[in-house]
Amino acid sequence: MLEQLLADLFGDQHLLRQNIIPAEILFGHPGFQRAYHNLQLSGVHRITLYAADVARSHDGRWWISGDRTHAPAGLGFALENRVIASRVLPTAYRAINVMRLAPFFSQLRQTLRDSAQRFKENPRIVLLTRGPESPTYFEDVYLARYLGYTLAEGGDLAVREGRVMLKTLGGLLPVEVIFRRVPDGDCDPVELAPASLSGISGLVDVAR
């Protein structure tokens, strides 16, 4: 549902035309980026990761109190906690039959691989981080290492001739997929947030 909602709000906007969603709510929301309007993403999901805030009421029922699709944090911490728990309390860990996280990360790898437009068998994927000043930097580093991706900050990437390139000592290397851990509004200082030091200049234009 959220996937279809985003496709409409950043596309034909039938929900606005039919007044199902008031225009002032959408256009007044800080999360609505006009630069993304009519951005065609053929064969690519707009939402790769989804997380929910859950709370337990007084009667024992669980409720979802919030949706998180904005580069949700927690994956790396969950993985690290599992590793530590399995080493510190191995007997108890095996006894409670905890569901393994490996299948989830395998699916995540496959999803990111499938989103590549070229070299689908072995695309170059980078994890875009805000850097050491970010409160989730440890998680970014841990995830990049676990998934086998290059950890990159905005300054490590550049746009050349309509493609995102990774700067290396050996020259520029083409990037097929960016696993973004940077908020939407900070992705491109040219079109989104001029003060952003985390984004890649020209990234939105590449997506177009």
Image (cartoon, rainbow, N blue to C red):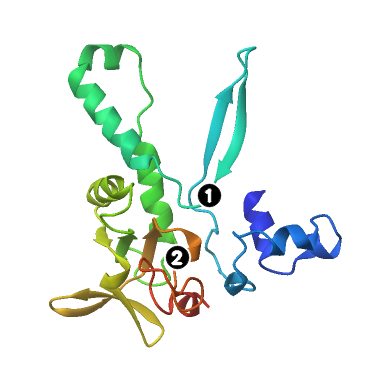
| Residue under the point 59% across and 38% down | 66
Q: How many marks?
A: 2
Q: Position of residue 181 (x, y in %)?
A: 39, 55
Camera sees residue 122: no
Classify 99 as above or below 60: below
Residue where numbered disc 2 is placed: 186
| Residue under the point 74% across and 57% down | 25
Give the label, 2 or 1, closer to the camera: 2
Looking at the rendered structure, which numbered label has been put on residue 45? Answer: none
Q: Is residue 134 left or right of residue 194?
A: left
Residue where numbered disc 1 is placed: 69
Q: Is residue 125 left or right of residue 47?
A: left
Pick the front one: 165 or 54: 54
SS type, badge 1: loop
Pick the front one: 136 or 94: 136
Q: Position of residue 108 (x, y in %)?
A: 40, 48
SS type, badge 2: helix
Residue 179: which quarter of the image?
bottom left
Residue 169: which quarter of the image?
bottom left
| Residue type at numbered disc 2 | Asp
Residue 186: which quarter of the image?
bottom left
Hey, which residue is sitting farthest right in the picture?
A: 18
| Residue under the point 58% across and 42% down | 67
| Residue type at numbered disc 1 | Thr
Disc 1 residue crowd, few under 14, some 14–19, many 20+, Cα 10 Å: some
| Label 2 with label 1: CB-CB less than 8 Å | no
Hey, which residue is sitting farthest bottom in the picture?
A: 161
